[in-house]
Structure formats: C-alpha cells, structure tokens
Image (cartoon, rainbow, N blue to C red):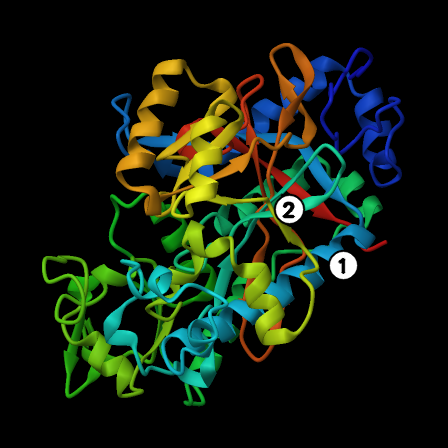
C-alpha cells in the first residue's frame, strides 16, 4: 500500500524521519506495507475487526446514549519500538515505580518527605485519596503498587515524557494481549522475521506476582470485579481465565474471624490473595465508603491482620493524583538520590498563585486537567476549545484551584494508520505495564492508544480512541 504523500507535519513520526526516510527498526514492516495492495490491507483490517468481535473485546462507555458495548478498534499497522529505546524506557519505569513505592510507604508511616518539605504536607494529608485507615500500614513485603500502567507520550523532538502514573487499577492489559494474538495472525511470517519480544507470558507473570504476596506455598488467588456492568469487565474475566483463578464479586466473598472466604458449591473456601479491580473506597463499607454495595464488609481488617493480600494495596491512589505527579522528579531524587531517567511534562499547579495566574492568562495554549478525573474527562485542550469553554474552565479554576493542573499542549507523535482515506498519521500515546513482585519487571510491549479522529490528541477509548499492537524488538 503506497505511502507517497504521507506527511506527519510538525510531529515526530514513529515510522518516518522528517525527510521521509524509513526509520531502521521499521524497514522490514515498510517493505511489506509498500508491496501490499490497498485491497489486501482493507481485507486484513476487516478480518481483524471480525476477530475482535468474536473474542468479545468490548468495553462499556458511561454517559453514552448510543449503547453501552463498544469494540476498541485495533488498527493493524503496529507501533514498533527499537530495543535501544525500550531499554531506556524500561530503566526509567523501574526507577519511577521504585520511588513511588517508597513514597507511599513513607507518607503512611514516618512522613519524612512531608516533614522535610519536599512535598507539601497539606497536598497529601488533605487529599481525598489519602486514606486515613491506611496510616501505619505496611503491606506484605512492603509493596504497595504491584501493577502499574504508566502513560507516556513522545513530543516533536522524539523525547518520551511521562504523562500519568496509574497505580490504582490500571486497565487495558487484556487489549495488549488480545491485540497481539490478532496481529500475529495478520502478519504470521513478518512477525517471526522481525524478532518481536513476546507478551503472552503476562498472565503467568501476573499470577506469580500475586502468589508472591502470600506467605503460603500454594495460595488461592481471585480477581475481584465490580460486575458485568463495569467498563473493564471483559478484562477482569479474561485475566481470571488466563491465570486459571476465580473471578469473584463482593457478593461471593464473606469475612469470618478476619479471614476472607469464597462461597462455592462445596462450601466456604479461604482466599489468600485478591487482585482487586474496584476502587479503594468501595473495597470495604466498614473501613471506607459506608454506602458501597460492591465491597466486602471486614476485608480491610482481614488485610491488616495479614490474612489476605490485596493488589494493589489500598491507599495507592494518592500517589497518582495529578497534583502529586508534579513532585515525582523530587520524589525520585529524595528516595533514590538519582535524577529521573524519564521526565515529566512541565506542569503548572493551580494551587500555586504564580502558576494559577499563568494558567488563567494562557489557558488557550494549555491542557487543563482535573486532578482526580480519568478517562479523558474533566479536561480542557486549550487550542481546540472555544472561548466559552476557556471561560468556563477559568471559573472552575478560580473556585477550586487545588483541583486543577495545566500542561503545555504536547505535539504527540504519530504512527501511520489505516483509514478510509488510506494510510495517514494519527496521534498515539503508550501505556507499558510494570509488575512489582520479587523484583520490578516491565512487560516488553504496551498498549498503544491512537486518536482515530483527524487532528485529535485524545486517545482514550471512552473518547473515541483505538489501539495498536506494540512491537518491542529483540535487536
């Protein structure tokens, strides 16, 4: 399929250099693409779409009147990352997860970083995600964030930046795994020739990490889901099936004598480790939100008694607050005495008077984010917004400055994508997954989310984004 006329404009393109040459790690795929007819590529895309439907790769979109179930569109042109680039990403992610874990242990115990004034104490202690019941807690083996999904973007210079830390219940890994299976069928020979690192062992690694939380030789593990109406239910059921463990909801579990049991057809069976996919505050109505209908009364006491392991640990949400994000470079320096390998996007904290004034004066050039929102909600992209929207967000910021941050509008990198108009560039981000068990391990692949709408920078599936398979090469 010919790519003459393809232009990334001012953006960094993952496949092509600014002068139109193919980047070395893309050469093998480009040769295939250049020989394939438009008809063949459309047929391959059609086959991939059908396979997605057959696999049930759907997600739910809240606030959508057009129906709940949607397919996360998988574009068949992959995003390819060279081994050299991946090694830097891997080192930077390990460093970041290590530091954030130490930060969580500190703020719920000695609070040295707050006493030393490196991070403002009120930012943490007044955060709704700082859970008072967790004060004084040390999770099994001192690990708070067992599963992390970190969002990165690449700017016009080609530099990767950390956009967001997801330490609560990061989603999307099932799409990474299923997309890989589909794309291997689309390009079977090419895939083997290119030397792509595997991701299929993720469920086994996840299970090993979960088992590591328990002190038992053969712990019973379960995945806790809010239920079939949750947006990521496909993922919950998929991961439970792949690991060969039970998928449970709150009604399936009961706490007796500070131990957690599953209700089975053979009676009660103790469960030792729970991979929870519900938010902290819904986990236990006795400890957190008393109105929660999803949680298990008494599970937090069982956790504190050491009778059940939870991944991720309750309380991790405070470390991926978008306002705390701005302090992560200082957090890394404080705990590890190292400079960050991967940098943050420059961030303005509206809680700071000088930053707030800058944001209000330059809102038309900035991306404004609500600190506790997710999924592309509570966000303003200044250059794309109307004057009325600018004014609305100015009012929101003035009324509640602590709740907002702002960042420059990054020129996200592009990857050639298959559309009705042919092969055109679409903006992407990158979500690698990090497991923290006996050691910290970065899975050699990622969920690449792609903004399917022309010119759009919003890649969230809930906002109309799609995905690509991400190939990390051995060499």
User: Is 176 above or below relative to 209?
Assistant: above
Q: Is residue 57 visible?
A: no
Q: Which residue is at the far left? A: 291
Mark number displayed over residue 12: none
When the figure is inspected, residue 475 is found, relative to residue 94, above or below; the finding is above
Position of 229 compared to 245: left or right?
left
The image shows residue 49 at horizontal and vertical percentages of 53, 28
Q: Quadrant of the N terminus?
A: top right
Residue 452 lies in quadrant: top right
Q: At which x and y percent is residue 105?
A: 43, 77
Instruction: Name the residue: 53% across, 19% down.
Output: 453
Q: Please name whichever residue, 295 or 341, is drawn nearer the observer in this view of the structure.
A: 341
Left or right of 138: which side holds 175? right
For mark 1, does the 10 Å Cα neighbourhood hold few (<14), some (14 to 19), or many (20 or more) residues? Answer: some
Residue depth check, mark 1 versus mark 2: number of the one nearer the observer:
2
Please name whichever residue, 71 or 400, is drawn nearer the observer in this view of the structure: 400
Query: Residue 347 placed where, x, y %?
Result: 53, 44
Residue at position x 61%, y 49% in the image: 446
Return the residue at label 2: 161
SS of the residue under disc 1: helix
Q: What residue is shown at x 27% (from left), y 83% (from top)?
A: 304
Question: Which residue is label 1 attached to?
Answer: 87
190 shown above or below 4: below
Residue 423, visible in the rendered structure: yes
At 20% from the left and 72% from the top, the residue drawn is 264
Residue 174's spot in the image, x, y percent?
49, 50
298 displayed left or right of 112: left
Q: Secondary structure at mark 2?
A: strand
Question: Can you say whether 105 is above or below 312 in the image?
Answer: below
First of labels 1, 2 by sequence position: 1
User: Which picture quadrant has residue 434?
Assistant: bottom right
Left or right, 398 with reference to 15: left
């Amino acid at each position: 399929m010919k790519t003459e006329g393809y232009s990334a404009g001012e953006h960094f393109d993952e496949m092509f250099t600014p002068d139109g040459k193919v980047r070395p790690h893309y050469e093998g795929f480009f040769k295939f693409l250049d020989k394939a007819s438009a008809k063949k590529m459309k047929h391959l895309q059609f086959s991939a779409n059908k396979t997605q439907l057959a696999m049930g790769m759907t997600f739910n979109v809240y606030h959508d009147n057009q129906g709940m179930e949607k397919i996360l569109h998988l574009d068949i042109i992959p995003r390819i990352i060279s081994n050299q680039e991946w090694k830097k990403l891997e080192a930077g992610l390990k460093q970041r997860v290590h530091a954030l874990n130490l930060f969580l242990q500190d703020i719920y115990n000695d609070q040295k970083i707050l006493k030393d004034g490196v991070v403002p104490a009120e930012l943490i202690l007044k955060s709704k995600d700082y859970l008072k019941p967790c004060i004084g807690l040390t999770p099994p083996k001192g690990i708070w964030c067992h599963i992390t999904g970190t969002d990165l973007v690449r700017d016009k210079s080609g530099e990767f930046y950390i956009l967001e830390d997801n330490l609560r219940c990061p989603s999307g890994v099932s799409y990474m795994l299923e997309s890989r299976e589909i794309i291997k069928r689309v390009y079977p020979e090419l895939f083997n020739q290119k030397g792509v690192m595997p991701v299929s062992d993720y469920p086994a690694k996840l299970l090993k990490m979960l088992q590591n939380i328990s002190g038992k030789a053969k712990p019973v593990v379960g995945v806790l889901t809010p239920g079939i109406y949750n947006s990521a239910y496909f993922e919950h059921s998929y991961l439970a099936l792949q690991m060969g463990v039970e998928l449970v909801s709150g009604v399936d579990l009961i706490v007796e004598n500070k131990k957690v049991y599953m209700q089975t057809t053979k009676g009660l069976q103790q469960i030792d480790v729970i991979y929870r996919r519900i938010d902290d505050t819904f986990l236990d109505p006795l400890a957190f939100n008393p109105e929660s209908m999803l949680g298990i009364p008494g599970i937090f006491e069982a956790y504190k008694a050491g009778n059940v392991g939870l991944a991720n640990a309750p309380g991790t949400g405070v470390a991926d607050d978008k306002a705390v994000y701005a302090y992560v470079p200082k957090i890394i320096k404080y705990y590890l005495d190292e400079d960050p390998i991967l940098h943050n996007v420059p961030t303005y904290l509206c809680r700071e008077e000088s930053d707030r004034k800058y944001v209000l004066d330059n809102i038309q050039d900035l991306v404004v984010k609500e600190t506790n929102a997710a999924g592309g909600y509570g966000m303003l992209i200044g250059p794309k917004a109307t004057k009325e929207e600018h004014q609305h967000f100015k009012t929101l910021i003035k009324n509640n400055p602590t709740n907002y941050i702002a960042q420059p509008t990054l020129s996200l990198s592009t990857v050639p994508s298959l559309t009705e108009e042919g092969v055109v560039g679409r903006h992407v981000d990158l979500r690698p997954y990090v497991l923290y068990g006996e050691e910290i391990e970065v899975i050699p692949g990622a969920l690449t989310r792609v903004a399917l709408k022309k010119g759009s920078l919003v890649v969230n599936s809930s906002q109309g984004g799609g995905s690509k398979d991400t190939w990390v090469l051995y060499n």
